[in-house]
Image (cartoon, coloured by chain):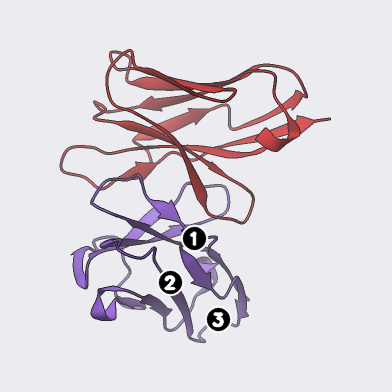
């Protein structure tokens, strides 16, 4: 079974630039999550989708972050414009239901300089 | 998150030694989950504990949930270099999102 795919693996951008991350969940998984993990901390949930609808985006900084999940499959997370404090690993995960027994991708490591 | 604390923050052990990582919740737990993360990579689900006193094992890793104390322990027996990584506990709380602890970084010296 293919796992959760994320791209790119690494990205370095200058502050105020824009960046987008892509996630392809495990086939058939209705729930998709985006997490932000700052170095030395545990992952923090940014947004949760159930199919193509948003279940929770309460911790998403909506002035600069946006996410979409068209057709309830792939998802993209965008940051515009990026700030230095956005440097982190962005993890995508998917699960069959709302449970946290989710499968994680390898993450995208973003460095904002 | 402040709901979950982990100790120690980091741990260095000699190969073959046993070790324990603790996760303590500030609120009543409805389930406690353990994940392992290699540096710079995604999380690997290890175990889920739901009932007080529940204990689960996978290979040389054993996790136990003490619901009364609102804490869980993860014990590794005869550690190996392959056990190295960051161990994260996670929990779901009533009316809240699922949250993770800050993680415990484990290094195993050959």
Residue A112 showing in the rendered view: no
- x then y, percent, for residue A17: 52, 87
Image chain in purple: A
Question: Mark 2 near mark 1, Cβ–Cβ under 8 Å?
Answer: yes
Q: Earlier in the sequence, mark 3 or mark 1?
A: 3
Q: Quarter of the image for the C terminus of chain B: give it.
A: top right
Q: Are discs 2 and 1 located on one and the same chain?
A: yes
**Mark linked to residue B8:** none
Residue at image mark 3: A15
Residue under pointer 1: A105
Few, some or many C-alpha atoms within 10 Å of disc 1 (few <14, some 14-19, many ≥20)? many
Q: Position of residue B95 (x, y in %)?
A: 15, 43
Q: Which quadrant does the N terminus of chain B fall into?
A: top left
Chain seen in red: B
B59 or A93, which lies in front?
A: B59
- Residue drawn at (24%, 52%) of the image: A97
How many residues crowd mark 3 within 10 Å: few (<14), some (14–19), many (20+)? Answer: some
- Residue behind mark 2: A23
What residue do we see at 28% from left, 54% from top?
A: A96
> Horizontally, is B85 left or right of A43 in the view?
right
């Amino acid at each position: 079974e293919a796992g959760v795919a994320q791209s790119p693996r690494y990205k370095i951008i200058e502050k105020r630039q824009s960046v987008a991350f892509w996630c392809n969940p495990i086939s058939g998984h209705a729930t998709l999550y985006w997490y932000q993990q700052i170095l030395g901390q545990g992952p923090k949930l940014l947004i949760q989708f159930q199919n193509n609808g948003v279940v929770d985006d309460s911790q998403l900084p909506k002035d600069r972050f946006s996410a979409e999940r068209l057709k309830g499959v792939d998802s993209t997370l965008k940051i515009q414009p990026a700030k230095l404090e956005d440097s982190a690993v962005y993890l995508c995960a998917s699960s069959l239901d709302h449970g946290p027994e989710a499968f994680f991708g390898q993450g995208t490591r973003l460095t904002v300089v | 998150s402040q709901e979950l604390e982990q100790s120690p923050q980091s741990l260095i052990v000699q190969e073959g030694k046993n070790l324990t990582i603790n996760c303590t919740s500030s609120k009543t737990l409805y389930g406690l989950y353990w994940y392992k993360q290699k540096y710079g990579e995604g999380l690997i689900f290890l175990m889920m504990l739901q009932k007080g006193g529940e204990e689960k094992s996978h290979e040389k890793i054993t996790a136990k949930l003490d619901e009364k104390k609102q804490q869980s322990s993860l014990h590794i027996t005869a550690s190996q270099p392959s056990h190295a990584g960051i161990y994260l506990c996670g929990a779901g709380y009533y009316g809240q999102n699922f949250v993770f602890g800050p993680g415990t970084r484990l290094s195993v010296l050959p």
